[in-house]
Image (spheres, grey):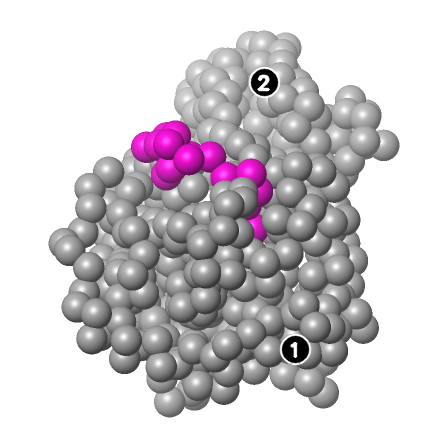
Amino acid sequence: MRTLAPLFALSKAALLAAFISQPTAAANEHTVRISPQLEQQVIAWRRDFHQHPELSNREFRTARVVAEQLEAFGLEVQTGIAHTGVVAMLRGGQPGPTIALRADMDALPVVEQTDVPFKSTAVGEYRGDEVGVMHACGHDLHMAMLLGAAEYLAKNKADVKGNVMFIFQPAEEGAPGDEEGGAELMLKEGLFADIKPEAVFGIHVMSPFNTGEIGYRSGPFMASSDRFHINVKGQQTHGSRPWGGVDPIVTAAQIINNVQTLVSRQINITKAPAVVSFGIVEGGVRNNIIPDEVYLEGTIRNFDMDNRAEIFNRLRTTAEHTAKSAGAIADVHIHEGYPVTYNNPTLTMNMLPTLERVAGSDKVKESELVSGSEDFSFYALETPGLFVFLGITPPGQNAAEAPSNHSPFFYADEDALKTGTELYINWVFDYPKVANTH
C-alpha cells in the first residue's frame, strides 16, 4: 500500500468543517442528525461523482477526489489499494472497537437517459469499444453518504469510541477482462491485515424501495454469483450422415436439460433456493454441417455456501457423464464469483433499533431474498457484517415500477442521502454499546 502526499493545510480542513453540525436530539435523544449544510454538501458530492463516472478499476479521478476530501478531514489516508481503492482511518477520542464502513466507487457501461441537469455524458472503453458511462447503480450516492459521515465523525471524533475504517472500494461491478479487483483484491492486499474491524457495515440504494425506506434481512440476504462455461467436443460430420461423427449440438441440448435437475432433484432446496441458468449457446456455421464443438455459458445463483459447493461438483459430473454417454467430451470450467452476502444474525438484531430510529420504524422493512449479488460478501466472510438497502424512489411513485438499478433511466431521489449519511454515523455511535455480543 502506498500513502498520499501530506495532509491538506488546516485552513482547508477548517473551511470544510463549517458544514458540520453538532449532535442534536431527534425523536430519540441518542439519534444523530446532520445539519442542512452538510446535507447540501453530500448532495453536491453526489452530483459531482454522477457527472464524472468511471468504470471498474479505472476510478482515477474518483479516487483522487475522495482521497483529497478525506485528507482535508484530517484522517489517515491510504490510496492505491486494489488499483484505485481508498481507505481512511479515524482514531476516536475514546477507547472502543474498530468498525468498517464501506462504499463502492465504480460506474457502469450505460448511456444515461435521464434529464437531470448533472446528467453524465462521459465515455469510456469497455471490451475494446467506446461506451457511455453512468452511475446507474447508485455508487455515486454511496460515496457521497460515506464522505458525509466521515466529515461529521472527524469533526466529532472526541465523542467516537474506538476507530472507524472508511473503505472506498473500486470494481464492485466486476474487474474488466482478466484483471483482479474489488473487495476480494482489497482483502488480498492486506485491507484487514493490520487492523481487523469487529464489524463491517454497508448500504446500497435500491429503486424498489421508496425514499428513506430501509430493507434488511438477517442471515443470507443476497445470492452468490458464479459463472460457468462448458466446451462440448464432438466430431464434425455432414448433416446428412450424423452417424459419421459425434453431434455436440444434441449432446449440448441433453446437458442443458440434465443440468436443470441439479436444483429440482439433487440439491436440498429446503436449506436455501438456488438456480442454474444458461445464457449462451454457440455452435455451428452452416445448416448442413454438424460442428466439432458447442460452447455453453451460464450463471449459478445460490444462498447457501455448502449447496454452492455441491452444485459445482454435480454440474461437472452431470455435464461430463452426459457427454460421455453420447461419445462426446464436456470440458467444464467454473469461475467463482461473489459468495453469499450474509448478515450476521446477532449483529443485525442488535443494530435493528438503529435502523428504526434513523429511518422511523414504519420505514424499516424485512426484505425478501435477493438473487442479485454483491462483493460486500467478501468482507462479511472475514468479520461480522450488516448490509442494508436504502430506498431512493420518490414518495407517491410506485417503487415496484421504477426503473431498476443498472437501467439507463435509473433515478435517485436525493432526499435519501440524509437518511443514508445518518445511518452510517449512528452505526458508529451505537455499535460500541453492543460490541462483543455477536
Question: Could you say where residue 39 lies in the image, as x and y percent from the top left?
Answer: 48, 81
The segment highlighted magenta reads 186-202
> Which label sits on residue 334?
none
Q: Point out the residue furthest to the left here.
A: 5
- Residue drawn at the location 50% of the way across and 14% of the way down: 329
Question: Could you say where residue 333 lies in the image, as x and y percent from the top left?
Answer: 47, 23
Badges 1 and 2: C-beta atoms under 8 Å apart? no
> Label 1's element?
loop
Q: Nearer the viewer, residue 219 or 400?
A: 219
How many angstroms separate mark 1 from mark 2 (CA)?
Answer: 58 Å
Q: Point out the residue furthest to the right here.
A: 270
Please identify the quarter of the rendering in which residue 11 is found.
bottom left
- Residue drawn at the location 55% of the way across and 74% of the way down: 23
Disc 2: which residue: 316
> Which label sits on residue 25?
1
Quadrant in which the C terminus appears: top right
Decide if residue 301 is in sight here: no
Labels 1 and 2: the sequence-earlier one:
1
Q: Is residue 230 above or below residue 88?
A: above
Question: Could you say where residue 37 lies in the image, as x and y percent from the top left?
Answer: 44, 86
Quadrant in which the N terminus appears: top left
> Label 2's element?
helix
- Residue drawn at the location 57% of the way across and 27% of the way down: 252
Q: Residues within 10 Å of mark 2 (few under 14, many from 20)?
A: some
**Residue 335 horizontal side relative to residue 212, left or right:** left
Q: Residues within 10 Å of mark 1 (few under 14, many from 20)?
A: few
Please identify the quarter of the rendering in which residue 82 is found.
top left
Q: Nearer the viewer, residue 36 or 262?
A: 36
Q: Is residue 176 above or below residue 272?
A: below
Please identify the quarter of the rendering in which residue 115 is found.
bottom left
